[in-house]
Amino acid sequence: MSLLSGKLGLVFGVANKRSIAWAIAQAWHKQGAKLAFTYQGDRLKENVEELVGTFGPDTLLMPCDVTKDDDIATVFKSVGEKFGQLHLLLHSVAFAPKAALEGEFVNTSREAYRIAHDISAYSLVALSRAAAPLMTDGGSIMAMSYYGAEKVVPHYNVMGVAKASLEASTRYLAYDLGPKKIRVNCISAGPVNTLAARGIAGFNEMLKHYEAHAPLKRNVVPDELGATGVFLASDGAAAITGQVIYVDGGYQIMGM
Ligand code: NAD
Ligand code: 0WE
């Protein structure tokens, strides 16, 4: 039985095959959803074209820099024309200037703070607003978060503050869009070795720390994020909105 047959979905945040967005998109696809994709810019175009091509030659693929209102408007116009409707939206996008993730949080520049919040948090509001008119039979919107939103993770810095904003935005969006049967949730993933994690000093130590301290004594694998994405997209989660679901081997429950 396909959990998502007949569902139309739009995915933001595929950069390469290791992207969390790709794991969730594949899981949605396996459950019968029809998907459209966006990519950040020319630098990623070929890579994403190749991945998305595996879903069929007519898969809708559009550039979208989430800081650009015009890009967002064009994407949703195209989705409206091609799909006529939308059920699922994945936000798997984050960025802070590298320097802000290296030094101390106290030294975060006004510009780095603005950029991190614009790309990593405000974009969820903009995308949800654009998606809502297409979600005429209700919908499920989900965004990726991280534990640094609620506790201090050294060096995560302004990204932690932006994720706190993303999670709070999720709750306010859930309240606004609930009457339209649109649910909005976050998946808070444990560390995963992706492009966004690769450059982080000490990332491998972090993976080992999770293995040692998480109740399940291991790290999360991308397929498991896909499975949670399917659950949140499905009727099994019909009464779940405004939540942050931790998919982290249980790490978040620990006090020591
Ligand atoms: P990734 O690098 O594969 O994905 C990040 C995506 O953000 C890329 O596709 C990039 O193109 C996109 N992006 C950045 N700026 C953009 C812009 N201005 N416009 C449009 N797109 C833009 O890495 P990932 O780890 O798959 O990250 C996806 C999400 O998962 C992020 O929100 C990240 O914070 C979150 N997350 C990652 C981890 C982890 O350990 N990797 C853990 C928890 C949460
Ligand atoms: O959300 C993230 C990382 C997002 C991210 C990554 C980069 C690297 C390249 C945002 N902006 C940038 N900017 C760059 O220039 N994660 C959850 C992964 C991550 O990043 C960390 C972590 C973890 C976990 C940074 C410091 C400490 C822990």
Image: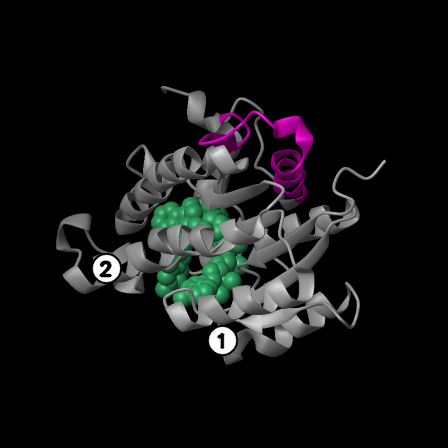
* Residue marked by disc 1: 41
Numbered label attached to residue 114: 2
Q: Nearer the viewer, residue 27 or 236?
A: 236
C-alpha distance separating marks 1 and 2 = 20 Å
On the image, the x and y values in percent for residue 231 come to 65, 34
- How many numbered marks, from 0 up? 2
On the image, the x and y values in percent for residue 140 come to 57, 41
Q: How many residues crowd mark 1 within 10 Å: few (<14), some (14–19), many (20+)?
A: few
Q: Amino acid at mark 2?
A: Arg
* Residue 243 in the image: above or below residue 122: above
Segment colored magenta:
223-250
Q: At numbered mark 2, what does the secondary structure look like: helix, strand or loop? A: helix
Residue 31 in the figure: left or right of residue 23: right
Q: Amino acid at mark 1?
A: Gly
In reply to whether residue 205 is colored magenta, the answer given is: no
On the image, the x and y values in percent for residue 14 come to 57, 61
Q: Nearer the viewer, residue 81 or 228?
A: 81
Figure coloring: one colour
Residue that extends furthest to the right in the rendered view of this protein: 1
Quadrant in the rendering for residue 254: top left
Residue 152 in the figure: left or right of residue 256: left
Q: Nearer the viewer, residue 95 or 56?
A: 56
Marks 1 and 2, the one that precedes in the sequence: 1
